[in-house]
């Protein structure tokens, strides 16, 4: 697990990435208007085990199927069962499952304090597991919040830098 001292220079080195969530939020709002929160939820619930490109393509397709009242009769990646369950939760306007999914929703909605622990953050923290433990999640969240207080950046901006 990387230390604050180790991570801090990387936050500054990649500071140009800090607006990833802000820029994504702005783009989604411009494309989806009043439906932007629906699209953000779909993007987040479809994200597990999908590349950014594939995730985006699935989210666009699912969004259109929902808007057209068509049944979603296709798979959305290798984690399809979990994703399908979460898509149904989004459609029913209930909270999706998953720590990463909900943190991703909050980060895309620019909620300070949210920490999306994804594949990239696990790599940044030198964790060689696909699924973080509850201890990993707690330590990473604490370190990102500490980096946020040191730098004055939002937690989701720290995550985007790392």
Image (cartoon, grey):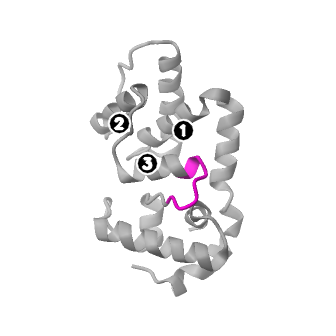
Q: Nearer the viewer, mark 2 or mark 3?
A: 3
**Residue 127: in sight, yes or no?**
no
Tell me how many marks there are: 3
Above or below residue 134? Residue 76 is above
Which callout, 2 or 1, points at the residue further toward the start of the chain? 1
Q: What whole-number distance in Å separates the C-alpha atoms at marks 3 and 1?
A: 10 Å
Q: What whole-number distance in Å separates the C-alpha atoms at marks 2 and 1?
A: 14 Å
Mark 3 neighbour class, 10 Å CA radius: few under 14, some 14 to 19, many 20 or more: some
Above or below residue 50? Residue 144 is below
Q: Residue at x 47, y 31 (%)?
A: 58
Tell me the SS state at disc 3.
helix
| Residue 86, position as x, y percentages in the image | 36, 35
Please tell me which residue lies in front, 80 or 25: 25
- Residue bearing the label numbered 2: 83
| Residue 127, position as x, y percentages in the image | 36, 71
Tell me the SS state at disc 2.
helix
Q: Residue at x 30, y 38 (%)?
A: 82
Tag shown at residue 1: none
- Residue bearing the label numbered 3: 102
Tag shown at residue 40: 1
Location of the N terminus (image quadrant): bottom left
Q: What whole-number distance in Å separates the C-alpha atoms at marks 2 and 3?
A: 13 Å
Q: Residue at x 56, y 68 (%)?
A: 162
| Residue 4, position as x, y percentages in the image | 51, 83
Tell me the SS state at disc 1.
helix
| Residue 124, position as x, y percentages in the image | 48, 71
Q: Nearer the viewer, mark 2 or mark 1?
A: 1
**Residue 58: in sight, yes or no?**
yes
Q: Residue at x 53, y 41 (%)?
A: 53
Please tell me which residue lies in front, 130 or 132: 132
Magenta span has 77? Answer: no
The magenta-colored residue range is: 107-114
């Amino acid at each position: 697990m990387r230390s604050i001292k180790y991570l801090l220079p990387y936050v500054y080195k990649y500071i140009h990435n800090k607006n990833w969530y802000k820029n994504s939020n702005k783009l989604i709002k411009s494309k989806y208007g009043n439906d932007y929160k629906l699209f953000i939820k779909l993007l987040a619930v479809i994200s597990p085990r999908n590349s950014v490109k594939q995730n985006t393509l699935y989210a666009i397709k699912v969004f259109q199927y929902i808007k057209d009242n068509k049944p979603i009769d296709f798979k959305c990646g290798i984690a399809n069962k979990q994703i399908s369950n979460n898509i149904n939760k989004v459609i029913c306007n209930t909270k999706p499952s998953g720590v990463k999914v909900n943190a991703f929703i909050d980060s895309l909605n620019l909620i300070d304090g949210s920490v999306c622990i994804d594949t990239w953050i696990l790599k940044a923290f030198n964790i060689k597991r696909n699924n973080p433990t509850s201890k990993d999640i707690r330590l990473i969240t604490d370190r990102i919040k500490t980096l946020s207080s040191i730098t004055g950046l939002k937690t989701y901006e720290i995550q985007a830098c790392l």
